[in-house]
Structure formats: C-alpha cells, structure tokens
Image (cartoon, rainbow, N blue to C red):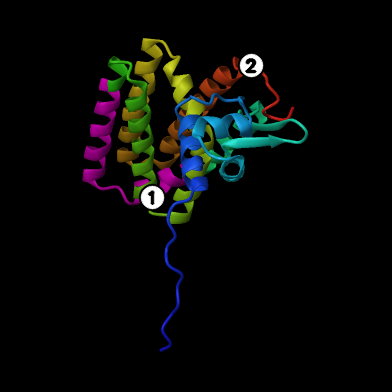
Amino acid sequence: MTEARLKPVSQRTLSDESTDRLRAAIRNGTLAPGARLVEQDLAEMLEVSRIPVREAIQRLVEEGLVNKVPHRGAFVYLPTRKEIEEISSLRVVLESFIVERAIERWQPEHELSLRQIVDEMRTAASQRDFVQLYEQDYRFHYILWEIADHSIMLEVVSSLRSRISRFLYEANGALPTDQLTSHVDSHDNLIEIIKNGNVAVAQDEMTTHVLGAKDRIVTYCELMPADGATGG
C-alpha cells in the first residue's frame, strides 16, 4: 500500500484568531445584532491588518452570524420576522421527529440526566443567571438530539438553533420572573410526556415549546432598531 502523503497541520492564522474574537463578540453581545462591521475599526481594535478581518467577516457570513448588504456593508445578523418564522417552522418539523425517535430509544437514565439539567435551570432562573440558564437549556435539547441518535439531523437542528441562539438568550433574559419559571417548568412537562411514550402528545408539547420561543424572539427583535442589517 502506497504511503499516504498529507500536509502538516498549519498553525492558527490571524484570520482564525480574528474569526474567533468576532464570533465571541457577537455571541456575548459586544457586537450587537444589527451593528455595522467596519473593517478598519475592527482591525484597529484587534491590532491586525484589514485582510484577516475581511476573511473573518466572510467566514461569519458563511456561518450565518453576519449579513452582507450590497453597497451598505456587513452587519451582525438580525433576523427578519419571515426568517424567524421559517427557522421556527423547520425546528417544529425536526424537533417533532426527534421526539418520536427519543421515545423509541428512551431509557430510565435519560430522565435522570434531563431532570438534573432542569434543576440547574431552575437554580439559574431563581438567580437570574441568564448565561447559565441558556447553557443548560441548550444542554437539555442537545441531550434529546443525542437520544434521537441521528447524526445528520443533529447537525441540521443545532445549526438552525445557533442562528437564533443570541436572540433566544436575550428574549429569555427579558422575561418577568413568573414567565421565566413557566419556561423552566415546560421542560419538566416535556420530560414527563416523553417518558409516558405518547408520540402525538409529545409532539404537540414540543411544538408549543418551539413556537413559544419563536414568539419571544419576535417580540425581542421587533424592539431592536432597524439598521439595514436585514437588507430590507
């Protein structure tokens, strides 16, 4: 067998580092939804030339975190209502399929893992620790995706959720205490229904869960100032 020849792994480039910095700034809100990304300004802040910044912005466009608007520039992604509706409708279809597969593969230890996550969500909500609440919420759904045991679907549904994750985080943070408690409790309801094995009821509950998230995001995004980021 002829020995395969592979190129050595290259060191991380300034473009890689710039992409990571900008991605993190978008996700933590330093670069707000709708904010215009000016290459020169970003290059000065990151202390690099404009070339790695330009490459980083293009990568983030491909990831869906940045929009490029012809003749206007690049903007941190701010979804239109239509995009939120489309993403949510796809999530309903995929999450319903996930619920069906999760029920088929359900084991007692799955309930234990998910209940523990909900307890951690409840603690975070009581402390209004929205970073921890978001992380545990994501863990909850990720475990359901893993239980469903469908790698391509996991990749697609996680990508869809990542497009709205920042807005979901912000929208949940704006909820009053009673609504935040209800949001956490809805995860316990999901566990109970999935455990009982009724696919139709579980799918209805998951649909309600996803559409509730959609409504919160729409409300939050409609309060954001329009800045041309959506191209509309």
Q: Is residue 43 left or right of residue 144?
A: right
Residue 46 point in image, percent of width and height: 50, 34
Question: Mark 1 belongs to which amino acid?
Answer: Ala
**Magenta residues: mostly which secondary structure?**
helix
Residue 55 point in image, percent of width and height: 59, 46
Given contact means CB atoms under 8 Å apart, are the residues at marks 1 and 2 in contact? Answer: no
Question: Which residue is drawn at the image coordinates 50% and 43% (left, top)?
Answer: 159
Q: Nearer the viewer, mark 1 or mark 2?
A: 2
Residues drawn in magenta: 95-123
Location of the N terminus (image quadrant): bottom left
> The residue tagged with tag 1: helix, strand or loop?
helix
Is residue 97 covered in magenta? Answer: yes
Circle 2 sits on which residue? Answer: 225
Return the residue nearer the eye: 166 or 210.
166
Is residue 51 covered in magenta? Answer: no
> The residue tagged with tag 2: helix, strand or loop?
loop
Location of the C terminus (image quadrant): top right
As measured in the structure, the alpha-carbon distance from the residue carrying label 1 to the one carrying label 2 is 39 Å
Residue 76 point in image, percent of width and height: 59, 30
Return the residue nearer the eye: 25 or 211.
25
Question: Which residue is drawn at the image coordinates 61% and 17% (left, top)?
Answer: 222
Question: Mark 2 belongs to which amino acid?
Answer: Pro
Q: Is residue 95 left or right of residue 54?
A: left
**Mark 1: few/some/many CA within 10 Å (<14, 14-19, 20+):** many
Circle 1 sits on which residue? Answer: 148
